[in-house]
Amino acid sequence: MTTHIGAAKGDIAPTVLMPGDPYRAKWAAEMFLENARCINDVRGMLGFTGTWHGHPVTIQGSGMGMPSLSIYANELIKDYDAQTLIRIGSCGGMQDHVRILDVILAMTASTLSTPSRGIFKELNFAPCADYGLLAAAHKAAIEKGVPTHVGGIYSSDVFYDERPDLNEQMMRHGILGVEMEAAELYILAARYGRRALAVLTVSDHLVTQEALPAQDRERSFGDMVDIALHAAFASNGTR
Ligand code: HPA
């Protein structure tokens, strides 16, 4: 066990899905995994391990924001040797052609700051997804018939944003959506030679001001889990 994860060493699978919300981890494990068992409940940040079509999979909550995700991703990678980490979560749409309930596969994640800022200092590192995962997720999403966009997203540090000018610059530069976790996940995967991807559903929209009705959230979350699982085990990776 680690500081924030109570699982024994062998209890975490090489493939980890990371929703922000720990209750979504529970829901996804119950819906998609066989023989799922709870492997972490430290601080209520639930994690489950089971199998999907015979492949071992862990679904571990990350919490909201990059400082929280960074704790879990660091421990999953360094202490439990996780190899493939896929964020599944929601984002705010930033372009007219991106609609509520569409899926965004984040090819890159621009950001103002992450917990890794101290390493890069004046460097503007470009966090990007694993191409093999990205391509496989795109194929899976198309096959499911889910409207899907591939491109850059913005990983912000704040939900209640007092700097709308930053969002405007992101939109002006074609960024598809805003969330709060992916950039740090991509940076950690790059640092430790692991595969990472963020599969996101548009839950609200910064241009149209629409928001996803509560009853649609569960279905859209299921699509993301399915796409992430197909991507994890279909791709051969690029390393
Ligand atoms: N901003 C930041 N993170 C988000 C949003 C948003 O509008 N929607 C879902 N996650």
Image (spheres, grey):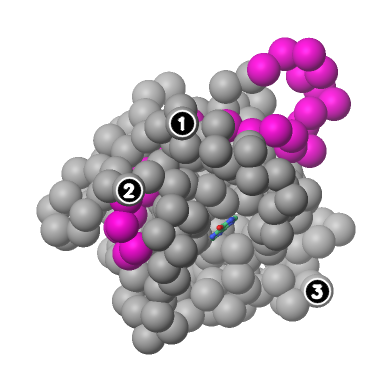
Q: Sequence order check: which comes first, mark 2 or mark 3? A: 3
- Magenta-colored span: 98-124
Q: Where residue 135 sits in the image (x, y, percent)? A: 28, 35
- Quadrant location of the N terminus? bottom right
Single out the residue that lies furthest toward the bottom: 215
x and y, in percent, of residue 140 in the image: 22, 50
Q: Residue at x 60, y 58 (%)?
A: 12
- Assign a secondary structure to mark 2: loop
Q: Which mark is residue 172?
A: 1
Distance from disc 1 to disc 2, alpha carbons, whole Å, reads 12 Å
Alpha-carbon span between mark 1 and mark 3: 39 Å
Q: Amino acid at mark 3?
A: Arg
What residue does disc 2 label?
96
Q: Secondary structure at mark 1?
A: helix
Does 99 lie within the magenta span? Answer: yes
Residue 42, can we see it? yes
The local secondary structure at tag 3 comes to: helix
